[in-house]
Image (cartoon, rainbow, N blue to C red):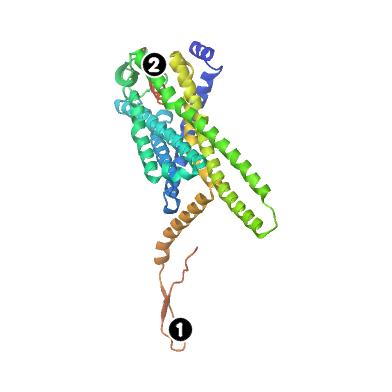
Amino acid sequence: MANATATDAYCVPGATNFNKAYSRLHGYIAIVICIIGSATNSINIAVLSRREMISSTNSILTGLAVADLLVMLEYIPYALHMNIKIGPQVNKNTYTWAVFVYFHSIFSQTFHTISIWLAVTLAVWRFVAIAYPQRNRTWCSKKNTTLAIVSAYIICPFLCLPIYFAMNIVPSEVTPHNNSEFAEDLSLPQNRTVYVLEMSKNKELVTAIMWIYSVILKLVPSIALSVLSTCLISKLTSTERRRQKLLKRSTIGSNEAEKQSLADESSARRSSRTDRTTRMLLAVLGLFLSTEVPQGLLGLASALAPDFFKSCYSMFGDLMDVLALFTSSVNFVLYCSMSRQFRCTFARLARRMLYATEEPAKFGTKLEPTTQFEGSPVRYSDRSPPSPGWWRVLYRFNRFIPPSNTIQ
């Protein structure tokens, strides 16, 4: 009770109670989102990689979907391990599970960082397409797009490199005196060795890593997305004003005036398609900002005040995880609602897959002879015609065992 009171005094009132209540639901919510998100991101990859959908923008969106898919697939066993009991009394602090949690903290942060910087690349490519259309084919060529995607997948692991050296797996002896309610297991002996993740004892190193996490991995891409999104919105507004002027200038009269009116109308339609694509991408960028900015600010507060992490940041870690997973899973809905080409390609792909499953049944139908009268030969017919944030991981893992030298 005293610990909860101290936490609430240092953080938002009721943070501890909220964390306890939500942690019971987090595993189930996260698994449902990850399963749905894995399916939708797989569909995104299948549709966006179709020959008729190939473009610089869609290539970046495909790379984004791959990173999100990997994060969600890896998060499922993590949620099962940390939040849901599978079978009777599983010891969650074995060396194997400690290695897995260590791997999870690195893997998820790395590929989430890749997603963030691909979103920044997407915003840059879209800004070039609107602000400099005559240079778009040169600057945002297929070669440059591939180079940007590959660079994100290569450079981002190096940006996350400090996380590799920030934690250690160490053994810890559990006795009846330091065994917490989270680690209590009646089927296991009270005196046993467990393995926990510990932060480096070098406080300067830990503080530096917190600065890297909050600034380079969170706030810098968030600021870049904010600036680019503002520029895109400004360009959309100016384009709309120019379109309205063109429509007002078009008059019905001579043949030349009619031709000019038709040309203006065609240009307006092309501009409208470009605007719809830009609005869709702005929605994607907005979702990224809604989750990355809060994490960046909380991480910055943790860098400035180390006690803030265990007193406040960790209380909302699960919630921020779910928000990030949700953001990565709803892109399919945005694409379907805002892109007619995506909807049509997805519909064609779905019909093709449906027909492919029906073909074996059609050809496997037994053929029956049909007798023709008046000396006609017997012919065979088919009687069945075809039918048409890494830090939270460390805290949540270590809360099972509360030794004095671990973050809780």
Indicate which disc residue 207 carries: 2
Amino acid type shown at disc 2 = Thr
Does 135 appear above or below 352? above
Q: CA distance from mark 2 to mark 1?
A: 89 Å
Q: How dense is the environment of label 1, judged by Cα within 10 Å: few (below 14), some, or many (20 and up)?
A: few
Depth order, front residue of 56/64 = 56
Name the residue rendered at 69%, 53% in the picture. Answer: 251
Mark 1 lies on residue: 372
Describe the element under mark 2 as helix, strand or loop. helix
Residue type at tag 1: Gln
Can you give x and y, in whole percent of width and height, for residue 34 in the image? 45, 37
Against 52, residue 297 (above or below) is above
Q: Secondary structure at mark 1?
A: loop
Residue 350 visible somewhere in the drawing: yes
- The reply to whether residue 28 is in sight is no
- Give residue 267's mark: none
Q: In this orientation, which residue lies closer to the viewer: 220 or 322?
A: 220
Q: Position of residue 254 (x, y in %)?
A: 68, 59
Indicate whether 49 appears above or below 400. below
